[in-house]
Image (cartoon, rainbow, N blue to C red):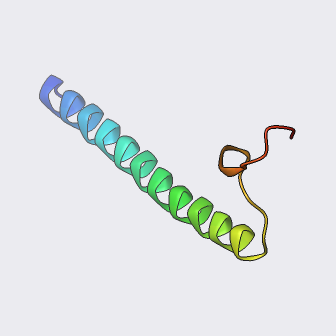
């Protein structure tokens, strides 16, 4: 394997890994937002949205 082929393969592999991670993050973000909407629809609110100071 020539030096150029090795470097090219390394860059392609890295680019694929980064693209895969970015896709995973976007899909996970979509799933978490969907879960939050479902919880809020059931009446469960986030702590930061609570108006009472006690809990």
Residue shown at 79%/64% (left/top)?
Answer: 44
* In the image: residue 38, left or right of residue 24: right
Front one among 9 and 1: 9
Residue shown at 52%/64% (left/top)?
Answer: 30
Compared with 4, 34 (above or below) is below
* In the image: residue 51, left or right of residue 24: right
Front one among 16 and 54: 54
* In the image: residue 48, left or right of residue 17: right
Residue 47: image x %, image y %?
73, 46
**Residue 1, visible in the rendered structure:** no
Quarter-wise, where is residue 48 in the image?
top right
Residue 20: image x %, image y %?
42, 51
Compared with 44, 2 (above or below) is above
Front one among 22 and 43: 43
Residue shown at 49%/54% (left/top)?
Answer: 24
Q: Residue furthest left?
A: 4
**Residue 36, visible in the rendered structure:** yes
Compared with 4, 39 (above or below) is below
Residue 55: image x %, image y %?
86, 40
Residue shown at 78%/46% (left/top)?
Answer: 52
Figure disc tally: 0
């Amino acid at each position: 394997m020539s030096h150029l082929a090795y470097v090219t393969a390394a860059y392609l592999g890295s680019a694929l890994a980064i693209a895969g991670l970015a896709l995973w993050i976007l899909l996970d973000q979509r799933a978490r937002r969907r879960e939050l909407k479902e919880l809020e629809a059931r009446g469960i609110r986030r702590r930061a949205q609570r108006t009472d100071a006690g809990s």
